[in-house]
Amino acid sequence: MSKIMQYPFKLIYQVYAPAKVNLWLDIVGVRSDGYHLLSTVMQTIGMADQLTVFIGSTEFPKLITSDSLNNVGAGVDQHEKWPLSYTQVAVVGNTVLNVSDRVITDSALLNCAVEDNLIVKAAQQFLQLASELDVPRIKEEHHFICLDLIKNIPAQAGLGGGSSDAAAVLRVLNDYFQVNATQTGAIALHQLASRIGADVPFALVGGTAHCTGIGEVIDALSPMDPLPILLMKPDYAVATGTAFRTWRQVSQQAGESLRRPDVTTGLAALKKRDYKSLAMASENVFEPVIATLYPEFTNQFSAMVKQSPLLARMSGSGSVIFGIFSDQQSCDSAKSILEDSDATAGCQFWSTHLLPRLPDFSIYFL
C-alpha cells in the first residue's frame, strides 16, 4: 500500500480467500513432535470466502453501513450482507482488534471459540509479531481494525478454507504494516503462517505448488491452465484428526499394498500438461481412510470417475471429491448427471475453475 495516510484516516481492504485442492497427497513420515510429513501438490481454485478488513486511526461507526462510510460502498462489494456490527476481541499495543458479529456467529456454529477462529489467531499473532519486530507503523500509530468474513467454502471438506482465510488476513495486514519489508520480517512471517496451520504457507502464495515438510516447504510450479473443476461434497464431514488417526490403522493393515503417488512422474506430467500421465501418477492416501469410515465413499468416487474427467481425486483428508475437465460443457454435463445419480444422492455440487494465481485485493480510502 503506497498511498500517504493523512490523519484521521479510514480504509477498507477486500480480498477473496480461495479454496485449494490436492492433485495428489502422500504421507512420507512423522516428525519427532508428531506432525506428519507430506508430499502434495496444491492448486488454488475459484471457490472463495470474502474477507473485509476495516483499518482506521479512529473507530468506525458502531453499525457499519454504506451511508456511514460516506458511500464509499459504491465501490465496496457488500454482498447484501451489511449493515454489520462488531465486537472487540483483543488489544495489541496501540491496536484494537475487532470482529464482526457475523464472525462470532459463524464461530459458534462450528463450536469454535472466537479467539480460536483462524482469522482472529492470524490477526492477533501478526500484530504481536509486528510489535516484536518494532515495525514503525504499529509502534508509533494507533489503529482500529475490524475483520468481517463471508463464508462460501464448506468446512471439514479438504478445501483449506480456514487456512485460506488466515492467509488472507496475513496478506492484508502485511500490505498495511509491511512486516516483510526486511528479510528478517519475511522469514518471521512465513514461520508465523506455518504455526497457524499447515496449509497457510501455501495459501499465502497460491497458484500451483509442490508442498513438503508439514506443508510449509513450498516449491512453486508453473501455473495450471484455468480448467473447469467440479466439486462434489458428500453429506458427511471429516475432521482432520480423525482422518490421520484412521490413516495410521489403514496404512499398517495395507502395508506395501497401499497405493501412493508417483511424485517424479507427476511433476513431469504437470510440467508438460500431460493430464493422462498426471492421472496415472496421482493418488491420495486418505481415500482408503474415508472409504473405511464411510463405505458409500467408494461408489461416490466411482461415479465421478465415470464422468471421464482429466483427473478425479479426493481433496486433502476429505470429504470433497473433485473432477478436473477439459472444457466447461463436459463439466456441466457431469454435474447434471451426478446431481440425478442415486450413488451421489445427498451430495452438494459446485462448478468453478482452477486459479493460476491469488486474486488481487481492493483498497478503498475514505
Image: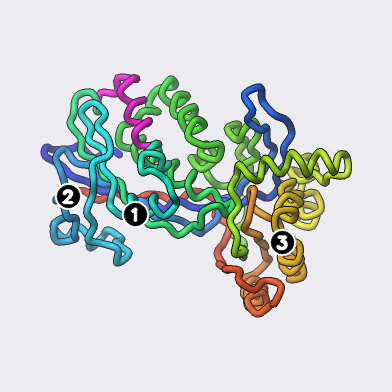
Please indicate whether residue 137 sits to the left or right of residue 133 in the image: left
Quadrant occupied by the N terminus: top left
Expressed as whole percent of the image width and height from the top left, the position of residue 86 reads 23, 49
Point out the frontmost of discs 1 and 2. Answer: 1
- Local SS, label 1: helix
Q: Amino acid at mark 1?
A: Thr
Q: Please state which of residues 246 and 276 is positioned toward the viewer in this rendering.
A: 246
Q: Please state which of residues 16 and 246 is positioned toward the viewer in this rendering.
A: 246
Q: How is the image coloured?
A: rainbow
Query: Who's the residue at 60% across and 60% down the image?
Result: 236
Which contiguous range is marked in magenta? 122-136
Expressed as whole percent of the image width and height from the top left, the position of residue 131 reads 30, 23
Q: Amino acid at mark 3?
A: Phe
Q: Please state which of residues 168 and 291 is positioned toward the viewer in this rendering.
A: 291
Q: Say which residue label 3 marks.
A: 297
State the separation of the CA atoms marked 2 and 3.
Answer: 50 Å
State the separation of the CA atoms marked 3 and 1.
Answer: 31 Å
Please check the rendered image and state whether residue 150 is part of the magenta-colored stretch, yes or no.
Answer: no
Q: Say which residue label 1 marks.
A: 105
Please indicate whether residue 172 sits to the left or right of residue 214 in the image: left
The first of marks 3 and 1 along the sequence is 1
Q: Where 155 sits versus 211, above or below? A: below
Q: Say which residue label 2 marks.
A: 366
Characterize the local packing of mark 1: few (<14), some (14-19) or many (20 or more) Cα atoms within 10 angstroms: few
Expressed as whole percent of the image width and height from the top left, the position of residue 77 reads 31, 61
Query: Who's the residue at 24% across and 57% down the image?
Result: 84
Q: Please state which of residues 319 and 53 is positioned toward the viewer in this rendering.
A: 319
Q: Where 17 sits versus 216, above or below? A: below
Expressed as whole percent of the image width and height from the top left, the position of residue 88 reads 23, 41
From this viewpoint, is residue 228 visible?
no
